[in-house]
Amino acid sequence: MVLIDLSTSLTDVGLAIESALFCGLLVGRRSPGLRYWAIAFGCTAIAALAGALYHGLVLPKWGVMICHATIAHGIGLASSSMVLGIVSRSLPASFYPWCFSAIGVYFVVFSGLKQQHLGDFRYVAADYLVALGIGVGLAIAASIRHPSHFGTWLMAGFSISGLSACVLMWQWTPIRAIHPEAIYHLFQMVALYCLFRGSGTLTHGHAH
Protein backbone atom coordinates (compact mmCIF):
# COMPACT_ATOMS: atom_id res chain seq x y z
CA MET A 1 0.00 0.00 0.00
CA VAL A 2 1.28 3.52 -0.84
CA LEU A 3 0.14 7.03 0.03
CA ILE A 4 -1.90 8.55 -2.79
CA ASP A 5 -3.25 11.85 -1.35
CA LEU A 6 -1.16 13.04 1.59
CA SER A 7 -2.80 16.44 2.16
CA THR A 8 -6.37 15.06 2.26
CA SER A 9 -5.37 12.09 4.40
CA LEU A 10 -3.50 14.24 6.94
CA THR A 11 -6.35 16.72 7.29
CA ASP A 12 -8.73 13.78 7.74
CA VAL A 13 -6.52 12.60 10.59
CA GLY A 14 -6.63 16.11 12.05
CA LEU A 15 -10.42 16.07 11.89
CA ALA A 16 -10.50 12.66 13.58
CA ILE A 17 -8.22 13.78 16.43
CA GLU A 18 -10.18 16.99 17.00
CA SER A 19 -13.54 15.19 16.94
CA ALA A 20 -12.31 12.44 19.26
CA LEU A 21 -11.06 15.08 21.70
CA PHE A 22 -14.42 16.86 21.72
CA CYS A 23 -16.20 13.53 22.15
CA GLY A 24 -13.98 12.69 25.11
CA LEU A 25 -14.69 16.04 26.75
CA LEU A 26 -18.45 15.52 26.45
CA VAL A 27 -18.87 11.79 27.00
CA GLY A 28 -20.10 10.72 30.41
CA ARG A 29 -21.94 13.98 31.11
CA ARG A 30 -25.35 13.67 32.68
CA SER A 31 -27.16 15.91 30.23
CA PRO A 32 -28.85 13.98 27.40
CA GLY A 33 -28.07 16.88 25.08
CA LEU A 34 -24.34 16.52 25.71
CA ARG A 35 -24.53 12.77 25.14
CA TYR A 36 -26.01 13.35 21.69
CA TRP A 37 -23.24 15.80 20.87
CA ALA A 38 -20.64 13.33 22.14
CA ILE A 39 -22.08 10.71 19.77
CA ALA A 40 -22.01 13.25 16.92
CA PHE A 41 -18.33 14.03 17.47
CA GLY A 42 -17.48 10.35 17.97
CA CYS A 43 -19.13 9.37 14.69
CA THR A 44 -17.37 12.25 12.94
CA ALA A 45 -14.03 10.95 14.24
CA ILE A 46 -14.76 7.44 12.91
CA ALA A 47 -15.86 8.79 9.51
CA ALA A 48 -12.74 10.97 9.31
CA LEU A 49 -10.47 8.01 10.06
CA ALA A 50 -12.17 6.03 7.30
CA GLY A 51 -11.62 9.01 5.02
CA ALA A 52 -7.93 9.10 5.92
CA LEU A 53 -7.58 5.45 4.92
CA TYR A 54 -9.56 5.90 1.73
CA HIS A 55 -7.66 8.99 0.59
CA GLY A 56 -4.26 7.97 1.84
CA LEU A 57 -3.87 4.35 0.81
CA VAL A 58 -4.47 2.17 -2.21
CA LEU A 59 -7.07 -0.26 -0.87
CA PRO A 60 -8.62 -3.43 -2.28
CA LYS A 61 -12.18 -3.16 -3.54
CA TRP A 62 -13.67 -4.50 -0.30
CA GLY A 63 -11.63 -1.98 1.68
CA VAL A 64 -12.93 0.88 -0.46
CA MET A 65 -16.52 -0.29 0.07
CA ILE A 66 -16.05 -0.46 3.85
CA CYS A 67 -14.57 3.04 3.87
CA HIS A 68 -17.42 4.40 1.73
CA ALA A 69 -20.03 2.84 4.02
CA THR A 70 -18.29 4.05 7.18
CA ILE A 71 -18.00 7.61 5.87
CA ALA A 72 -21.58 7.74 4.59
CA HIS A 73 -23.29 6.26 7.64
CA GLY A 74 -20.89 7.87 10.12
CA ILE A 75 -21.66 11.34 8.81
CA GLY A 76 -25.37 10.51 8.74
CA LEU A 77 -25.39 9.38 12.36
CA ALA A 78 -23.31 12.40 13.35
CA SER A 79 -25.76 14.77 11.64
CA SER A 80 -28.79 13.12 13.24
CA SER A 81 -27.18 13.12 16.70
CA MET A 82 -26.31 16.79 16.33
CA VAL A 83 -29.94 17.59 15.55
CA LEU A 84 -31.08 15.51 18.53
CA GLY A 85 -28.68 17.47 20.73
CA ILE A 86 -30.27 20.74 19.68
CA VAL A 87 -33.83 19.37 19.93
CA SER A 88 -33.18 18.36 23.54
CA ARG A 89 -32.83 22.03 24.50
CA SER A 90 -34.63 23.99 21.81
CA LEU A 91 -38.12 22.51 22.06
CA PRO A 92 -40.50 21.62 24.92
CA ALA A 93 -40.34 18.02 26.16
CA SER A 94 -43.82 17.33 24.76
CA PHE A 95 -42.35 17.60 21.25
CA TYR A 96 -39.57 15.06 21.86
CA PRO A 97 -41.41 11.86 20.79
CA TRP A 98 -42.51 13.40 17.49
CA CYS A 99 -39.15 15.00 16.76
CA PHE A 100 -37.14 11.92 17.69
CA SER A 101 -39.39 9.71 15.53
CA ALA A 102 -39.06 12.10 12.58
CA ILE A 103 -35.28 12.20 12.93
CA GLY A 104 -35.20 8.40 13.13
CA VAL A 105 -37.21 8.09 9.90
CA TYR A 106 -34.98 10.71 8.26
CA PHE A 107 -31.85 8.77 9.24
CA VAL A 108 -33.22 5.44 7.99
CA VAL A 109 -34.33 6.90 4.65
CA PHE A 110 -30.99 8.57 3.94
CA SER A 111 -29.08 5.51 5.15
CA GLY A 112 -30.98 3.35 2.68
CA LEU A 113 -30.29 5.76 -0.18
CA LYS A 114 -26.61 6.01 0.65
CA GLN A 115 -26.24 2.24 0.99
CA GLN A 116 -27.71 1.79 -2.48
CA HIS A 117 -25.33 4.39 -3.92
CA LEU A 118 -22.10 3.84 -2.02
CA GLY A 119 -19.34 6.03 -3.38
CA ASP A 120 -21.78 8.64 -4.69
CA PHE A 121 -21.22 11.37 -2.14
CA ARG A 122 -24.03 13.54 -3.48
CA TYR A 123 -26.34 11.63 -1.14
CA VAL A 124 -23.96 12.20 1.77
CA ALA A 125 -23.83 15.91 0.92
CA ALA A 126 -27.63 16.08 0.67
CA ASP A 127 -27.99 14.40 4.06
CA TYR A 128 -25.49 16.81 5.61
CA LEU A 129 -27.07 19.92 4.06
CA VAL A 130 -30.57 18.93 5.17
CA ALA A 131 -29.30 18.39 8.73
CA LEU A 132 -27.51 21.74 8.51
CA GLY A 133 -30.75 23.48 7.55
CA ILE A 134 -32.68 21.77 10.35
CA GLY A 135 -29.91 22.72 12.79
CA VAL A 136 -30.12 26.38 11.79
CA GLY A 137 -33.87 26.44 12.39
CA LEU A 138 -33.58 24.70 15.74
CA ALA A 139 -30.71 26.95 16.81
CA ILE A 140 -32.91 29.98 16.19
CA ALA A 141 -35.73 28.37 18.18
CA ALA A 142 -33.33 27.51 21.00
CA SER A 143 -31.92 31.04 21.10
CA ILE A 144 -35.45 32.29 21.72
CA ARG A 145 -36.01 29.84 24.59
CA HIS A 146 -32.51 30.12 26.11
CA PRO A 147 -30.90 33.48 25.25
CA SER A 148 -27.11 33.11 25.48
CA HIS A 149 -23.99 33.09 23.34
CA PHE A 150 -24.63 29.52 22.21
CA GLY A 151 -26.58 30.80 19.21
CA THR A 152 -23.54 32.75 18.02
CA TRP A 153 -21.28 29.68 18.23
CA LEU A 154 -23.77 27.34 16.57
CA MET A 155 -24.61 29.72 13.76
CA ALA A 156 -20.90 30.32 13.18
CA GLY A 157 -20.35 26.57 12.99
CA PHE A 158 -23.24 26.05 10.60
CA SER A 159 -22.15 28.98 8.41
CA ILE A 160 -18.56 27.75 8.16
CA SER A 161 -19.82 24.24 7.39
CA GLY A 162 -21.93 25.64 4.57
CA LEU A 163 -18.96 27.63 3.28
CA SER A 164 -16.77 24.52 3.38
CA ALA A 165 -19.38 22.63 1.35
CA CYS A 166 -19.23 25.39 -1.29
CA VAL A 167 -15.43 25.17 -1.33
CA LEU A 168 -15.66 21.44 -1.97
CA MET A 169 -18.36 21.81 -4.59
CA TRP A 170 -16.38 24.45 -6.50
CA GLN A 171 -13.14 22.47 -6.05
CA TRP A 172 -11.36 25.62 -4.85
CA THR A 173 -7.80 25.52 -3.53
CA PRO A 174 -5.20 28.30 -3.13
CA ILE A 175 -2.33 25.89 -3.86
CA ARG A 176 -2.52 23.35 -6.67
CA ALA A 177 -0.55 20.82 -4.63
CA ILE A 178 -3.30 20.78 -1.98
CA HIS A 179 -6.49 18.92 -2.86
CA PRO A 180 -9.79 20.84 -2.44
CA GLU A 181 -10.96 18.19 0.03
CA ALA A 182 -8.03 19.10 2.27
CA ILE A 183 -9.20 22.74 2.25
CA TYR A 184 -12.71 21.50 3.04
CA HIS A 185 -11.35 19.59 6.03
CA LEU A 186 -9.53 22.67 7.35
CA PHE A 187 -12.75 24.69 7.21
CA GLN A 188 -14.58 21.84 8.91
CA MET A 189 -12.05 21.79 11.76
CA VAL A 190 -12.94 25.41 12.53
CA ALA A 191 -16.65 24.63 12.19
CA LEU A 192 -16.37 21.69 14.61
CA TYR A 193 -14.73 23.92 17.21
CA CYS A 194 -17.61 26.40 16.92
CA LEU A 195 -20.18 23.60 17.20
CA PHE A 196 -18.37 22.20 20.24
CA ARG A 197 -18.50 25.59 21.96
CA GLY A 198 -22.13 25.96 20.96
CA SER A 199 -23.07 22.51 22.23
CA GLY A 200 -21.77 23.34 25.70
CA THR A 201 -23.54 26.68 25.99
CA LEU A 202 -26.70 25.19 24.47
CA THR A 203 -26.87 22.35 26.96
CA HIS A 204 -26.14 24.38 30.04
CA GLY A 205 -28.38 27.23 28.98
CA HIS A 206 -25.94 30.02 29.88
CA ALA A 207 -23.29 32.04 28.17
CA HIS A 208 -19.64 31.13 28.01
Image: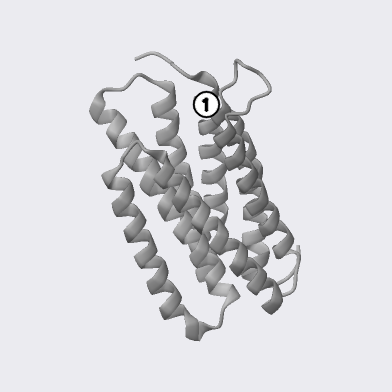
Which quadrant does the C terminus fall into? bottom right
Q: Residue furthest bottom?
A: 94
Kind of element beneath mark 1: helix
Q: Residue 134 at x, y = what percent? A: 54, 63
Q: Residue at coordinates 39% horizontally, 20% vertically from top-left? A: 57
Q: How many marks?
A: 1
Picture quadrant where residue 26 is located? bottom right
Relative to 119, residue 36 above or below: below
The residue tagged 1 is: 8
Task: Please give the name of the residue rendered at 32% of the width and 60% of the height, measured from the top-left corner.
Answer: 108
Q: Is residue 40 above or below residue 106?
A: above
Left or right: 139 in relation to 43: right
Determine whether 48 is above or below 173 in the image.
Answer: below
Quarter of the image with the N terminus is: top left
Residue 132 x/y as whole percent = 55, 56
Q: Quadrant of residue 68?
A: top left
State whether residue 151 is above or below residue 184: below
Specify few, some or many for label 1: CA neighbours under 10 Å numbering under 14, 14-19, or 20 or more: many
Can I make out residue 124 in this image? Answer: yes
| Type of amino acid at the residue the image marks with label 1 | Thr
